[in-house]
Image (cartoon, grey):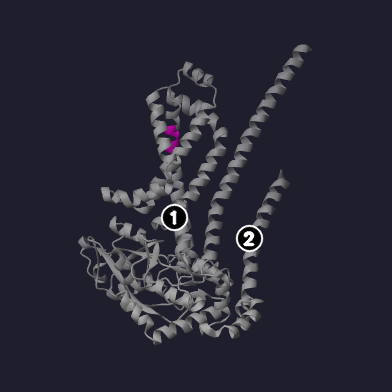
Amino acid sequence: MKTRKLIALLLTLVMLTAVFSACATKTDTDTPGASPNESVTGGDNTGADADTDADSNTGASNAAADAIRAAGVLKIGCKEDVPNFGLLNTATNEYEGFEIELAKLIANDIFGDPAKVRFQAVTAKTRGPLLDNGDVDMVIATFTITEERKLSYNFSDPYYQDAVGMLVRRDSGIESIADCDGKTIGVAQSATSKDAIQAAADAAGVSVTFNEYGTYPEIQAALNSGNVDVFCVDRSILRGYLSDDLVLTEDKFSPQDYGVTTKFENKELADYVNGLINGWLDDGTIAALVEQFGL
Amino acid sequence: MSRAPFALWRWERLWNDKAVIFNGFVTTLLVSLLALALAMAIGIVFGMLGTSEKKPLRAVNRVYVEFFQNIPLLVQVFFIYNAFPLLGFRWPVFTIGVVGVGIYHGAYVAEVIRAGIRSIPKGQGDAARSQGFGYIQTMAYVILPQTIKIILPPLTNQAVNLIKNTSVLATLSGLDLMYRADSWASQGTLSYGPAYVAAGALYFLICFPLATWARRYERRIKEREHLQLSEAAAEEMMLMAEEML
């Protein structure tokens, strides 16, 4: 009896160790890949370099772009519920918006064909993991650039700047953060809004509590049912939730920059994307898109 | 500094913020204990209804059990959270956790108890009645104590499932273990790897000892019974031997 118990305990320990060492092994293999940048794509690299010389017609070709070209499609993580940025049009089943156009421009640069994009809807919560596990090549999904996030992902230079705003029930009487003493604020997990509102509340001398939710519709439901008093996230996103009952206040907190996000290990892809974004910032392509979507 | 999802520095950050996770752990424990008490109370009452000789009472049991067993827990708690307020009731999330999880698992516990009572020979109840025991007394002193060793394994399953299911609160901003881990992971450095491992380990820490205890308890009861039986048999043999002499 005693020995059997001991064996069971040992087995449990062995299983746990296996889990942890699997994680450790992953760390070990990832790290050497991350430090010497050139060796990231490994064996493919030599062939890719040759390609770079051969088809220079796309102008910005490099190993990272070649890897995506070889895969045949550019996988983009985008928002599906943010009007004018990334919105799934349920009538046509097509994604539409500023960030969608940006993705198509990148696809056009890689393939010479803007249609070779496969969009995958992400949330503030899922976009990080999806990048890490390779489900998407890039995330263009109102992803705010922060110093802390730069520890985990690569960001391009900002293509748009937005501020955090407040959506409230029309009958709540809340007009600004100063009216929010003792109120509950609904924020999205993995969004920067919580820090922004906390700072604004501190400045206004009011105390607030936060409820975090996985998706925006959940916060909207919580706002409608009164479980939260304010829905706080980037104003561009909040505009998609305006209704007869819900209004946006004038508050604008912590202007923040959106960047195209790529996997941390893939420096080449980051450099490539950054080059594209800067080019489009310089030649007015992005300014035209911003105007087109009324941002 | 390594960027790997399980890099050492991420574990260090988690360790520094361990109070956050611990808060969630305490909430999960409290919700679990109260929900379990509620589920047991509901389960015993509805389990007894299910074995009643009166048809309407059995029907009440059926409706309750089928209703709560066949609608996902997530739907039930979302309904309480988002739809109840529109009808004029708003409960704190902690209450939603205790009541939502409690009544859901109460349905399962009721089935377990009903099966337990059914497994006791009918003669036991008749005998108790003949000695002047009322229905409640018969149940409390004769029937239910005998069901313990039968219902303990499935009941433990229910308790473990109940504890794990309190994690639905994470979707309601419920301040429980999963919510705290998830919330911590999604801030700043997005160190979700260590956060989920820690949350999993803490749930394991509650559930595994419970399951182990129940297994031991069950074994002890069976061993004791076995012992009593063999003692009785030995005594009988002695008597027989004496008679023969």
Name the mark on residue B66. none
Magenta region: which residues?
A: B41-46
Q: Chain of mark 1?
A: B
The residue that disc 1 covers is B27
The residue nearer to you, when weighing B154 against B216, is B154
The N terminus of chain A, quarter of image:
top right
Q: Chain of mark 2?
A: A
Q: Is residue B44 magenta?
A: yes
Q: Please report the residue visible at 55 percent of the width from the left and 49 percent of the height from the top.
A: B207
Q: Please report the residue visible at 59 percent of the width from the left and 44 percent of the height from the top.
A: B213
Q: Amino acid at mark 2?
A: Val
Q: Amino acid at mark 1?
A: Thr
Give the residue at the far bottom of this rendering. Answer: A282
Q: Are marks 2 and 1 in contact (CB under 8 Å)?
A: no
The residue that disc 2 covers is A19
The residue nearer to you, when weighing B193 against A66, is A66
Label 1 secondary element: helix
Is the residue at mark 2 from the same chain as the one at mark 1? no
Q: Is residue A260 visible?
A: yes
The residue nearer to you, when weighing B80 against A216, is A216
| Rendering coords of residue B20 (x, y %) | 46, 64
The residue nearer to you, when weighing A293 against B181, is A293
Mainly helix, strand or loop, the magenta region?
A: helix
Give the residue at the far top of this rendering. Answer: B244
Q: Residues within 10 Å of mark 2 (few under 14, many from 20)?
A: few
Q: Is residue B191 visible?
A: no
The C terminus of chain A, quarter of image:
bottom left
Q: Please report the residue visible at 31 percent of the width from the left and 66 percent of the height from the top.
A: A240
Q: Is residue A288 magenta?
A: no
Q: Label 2 to label 1, Cα distance in Å?
A: 27 Å
Front tag of 2 and 1: 2
Label 2 secondary element: helix
